Image (cartoon, helix red, strand yellow):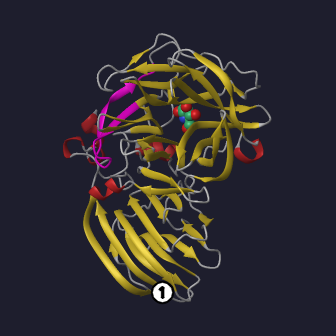
Amino acid sequence: MFTDLHRPRYHVLPSAHWLNDPNGLIHWRGQYHLFYQYNPHGAFHGTIHWGHAVSADLAHWQHLPIALRPDQSYDQAGVWSGCAVDNNGVPTLLYTGVHPQRQCLAWSEDNLLTWKKRPAPVLAAPLTDLPLVSGTHGPEWRDPWVWRENETWYMLLGAGVRDVGGTALLYASADLEHWTYLNPILVGDRAVTGEVWECPNLFPLGNQHTFLFSPVPEATYTYYFTGTYTAQRFTPFAQGKADYGPYFYAAQTMRDDQQRRLMWGWIKEGRTNEAQRAAGWSGAMSLPRILDLAPDGMLRQTPAPELAKLRGQHWCWENLLITAESPPLFNSPCAEILAHFAPGDAHRFGLWIYASEAECTLIAFDVAQHALIVDRVHSSLAVDVDQDVQTVPLPPTAPFALRVFLDHSIVEIFVGAHLCFSTRLYPTHPASTGIRPVAFGGHAHLLALDLWTMKSIWTSAEDDSLQPHNAHL
Ligand code: DQQ
């Protein structure tokens, strides 16, 4: 993979094969632990294990051995998603074993390196009278999200009420092992928010609660509600998507020792299954994002400030009048860009990225629509990658400012803290790396553009992403 133009350098991903959801996020004795759904046998979803990476500074990461394998009678088809809690000093994982889906528990006695599994699931049946949506192997109820209030543990499981909509079922326990069913905290409308909710997360944020869920069959976006959580029921008053690009799924959050609420999502691929298998790898974690709430209840997101440790050389430009003819400023597929614009008479302005004679992608503001435009129609000469134009209306207070993280095939765009848009780009030419400001139908002002080249997150000895794949066989 040394020569793989598309492989990210500063997003967490395994040395090869398949990654999906973030799992078991926990800050333990000064280290951030990031587990993830992992198939060590190929770049496709199957034989799901829990991979494990660790970071002391939220910027540089190290791979640790696989944490959980499908090795019990109750999880032999896969160790599906779940969370981590501190059970009176014992790091403890709750996850869904398949098939059928059952809620299971593992704990570590050696600082999260190896895990012991309880001989039997902690919850083998949903215990609810609600008619749950079922698949071929039984009810869909999974992805435990667990927290403690006073002396009681609570668990949410994603599920769906047949013909009604997605839901999150609430359970209680005194010891994490014996659970009683309480009620659904809310039930969605199937036509609006899907049949089944995966990966529920519920946490206090500001003076409200935020609820994250990832609905199927759409399986494309992580959604959020903000609202009140009282008497074990959640009442939403604001809602949105955690990321408006169609690749940020199954997000999970954690609180660190600075009391920050951090979120990661699974960045899916934007190319065919065959292309993923041919590449030998699929999926990556998003960058860590810090969450807070705007006064209107909308979720605000800021990339973790620790990411600045990955910055290399710095370049800046100021007060450029930009038009359709503006020349490229720089060439890089691995950079952070901070760009502040002011409108002129152009109807649309922004940046070309990954640009060459043959390929280019546009990230722009449309003035009349007050929208973010991401145009991937000419992103790649390959035929097996996603190509489209996405238009996302911006909140009225969003600035004409872009913070863009380019990491080869992954691009994460932040418009202020107001809106995130992640996308996937697979240019075919090594020369498709141009970064060029542009304005259409007139001019606009580029007040300032700061650019930093970005370094790899892996320490050199473990630089999986930069070593030939066969170094790990
Ligand atoms: N991925 C896991 C499930 C979860 C889904 C299986 C979400 O536990 O519901 O890999 O992407």
Q: Which part of the image, by quadrant, shows the C terminus?
A: top left
Q: Is residue 63 magenta?
A: yes
Helix, strand or loop at label 1? It is: loop
| Image point (68%, 18%), residue name | 127
Say left or right for 52 vs 230.
Answer: left
Q: Where residue 326 sits in the image (x, y, percent)?
A: 42, 85
Q: Residue furthest top?
A: 119
Q: Is residue 270 placed above or below 118 in the rendered structure?
A: below
Front-most of residues 239 and 468: 239
Q: x and y percent of residue 197 in the render?
A: 64, 37
User: Seen from this angle, which residue lies furthest right?
Assistant: 163
Point 57% across, 28% down: residue: 155
- Residue 359 seen in render: no
**Amino acid at the residue labelled 1:** Thr
**Which residue position is annotated with label 1?**
323
Which residue lies most toward the front here? Answer: 150
Q: Main secondary structure of the magenta part?
A: strand
In the image as oriented, which residue stretches furthest toward the left? 461
Q: Quadrant of residue 353?
A: bottom left
Q: Which residues are magenta?
A: 51-70
